Amino acid sequence: MRLLIVDDGQYIVEYLKHLVDWRKLGVDLVETKTNSIEAKEILIGNKVDILISDIRMPEVSGLDLLQLIKDERLKTKVVLLSGYSEFEYAQKAIRLGAADYLLKPVDKEDVEKTMQNVILAMENEKDEERIEWDQFDGFGYFLSTICDNNHKIKDYNLFHGYLKELEFCFFCASKLDQKEEMIIRDNVGGMESFIWRKGDRLFGMIQKVNMLSIKEKVNQVVFSDSFSLQKRNTVRHLFYQFFFQESVSSSDISKLRSYVAFTKIKAKEWGSVKKEVVRDFSLLSTKQQKLIYLHEVYNDLYFSDIKLRPTVAAHWMFDEIDNPEMGIQQLLNQLSRVEKETKCTNNDIIRTIQMYIEEHLGDEISLSDLGKLVYLHPVYLSKLYKQETGENLSNYILHKRMEKAAKLLIESNLHVVDVSRIVGYKKSQYFIKLFKLQYGITPQQYRRKQIR
């Protein structure tokens, strides 16, 4: 980690440089500058993790450096030095995005405490940056929260580390037009994986901080009380209360997990599962019991089979299950489909995927689309393909595209731009780069070499 200390007084920068043991705080390199113009050049041309700067300096002030970092979208964290008379400047600095400020005269304890907070914030941001939200199964995460058997909660640890700090509300919005739906989606803080649609209704959960802005613009939306995802019992209680008007406790849920159907699902004995589910359901007397049981069965089915699409599963959970008798029929239909599809071998799945890819090389091919083709969750499909073939799906698609491109270069007079589009790349420069990585030469060089 690299630290830059800037102050127009030589004594101050040397004092700060030797005030604390920077290595213990995780700082490997400490640089100092008394010329703020030179400091500006360092910030632009080099990666500086943390800047400690005097707030007022001739020519280029600490606020100027802070504004530069903001304008250039640098990731440098800024701590400004100010005196009591400059407190208004310090407040402005915080508004501009400064991580913190230190009042002069600075003592060792204040510096250490401030730097520890700044470095912790940086580490949390790095964790958030590592999160691949496009791979996040919001429905699976939600299931693992409200159901008793949280099968794959460990798979969501990185996501949970971020989400657990937030407050959420359940919501339901009906009779929405397209504009109102867009308003809601634009105000969910990028967490659309917690939003599901059925007809003209949207439902799911959003961050509490976004609730007010949606309320002001959309009339047909209802919110639950707020909750933290760390408190599973509260989440469960509010879920059943808000969507089904039922009061449910954790003990109600645990009681219904002793049925044989759950062990049958684990063993993937789908024919037996259907019989057990029908038998179990007939023994339940209240709507509350039936709702809990159906959710728990669906939870086990979703994670053990991994062939249920999140959107379909969410529609069932939030909409169709409101009438448990209708809900169980839909569940039995799902089980029948699963039983039929599991008879297909993995080889059949791989062949289907490969044939589709070869026929659609010019199209945009997403993992999600391929998953829908064979009724597999995208993440599971990716793992299955690698397990069965020894290569990644993305590599196979790339190989087939380059193979077709090479053939077109030899057998046609098409321009490189046209070849690029035919094999699915809108930007020819990107295509040329990939082609060169594959064959070691550019498409034009490849064509000349083959024609000779």
Image: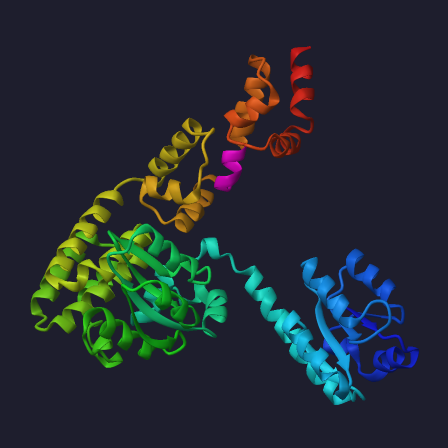
- In the picture as drawn, the residue positioned furthest to the right comes out as 10
Q: Position of residue 168 (x, y in %)?
A: 39, 72
Question: In the image, what residue occupies the spot 67% across and 20% down?
Answer: 444
Above-or-below relation of 341 to 226: above
Question: In the image, what residue occupies the spot 76% across and 60% down?
Answer: 47
Question: In the image, what residue occupies the spot 23% across and 75% down?
Answer: 241
Residue stretch rendered in magenta on the structure: 390-398
Residue 127: image quadrant is: bottom right
Q: Position of residue 24 (x, y in %)?
A: 75, 78
The chief SS type of the magenta part is helix
Q: Position of residue 75 (x, y in %)?
A: 68, 63
Above-or-below relation of 100 to 70: below
State left or right for residue 7 relative to residue 223.
right
Q: Is residue 151 visible?
A: no
Q: Position of residue 452 (x, y in %)?
A: 69, 10
Q: Is residue 392 magenta?
A: yes
Above-or-below relation of 301 to 401: below
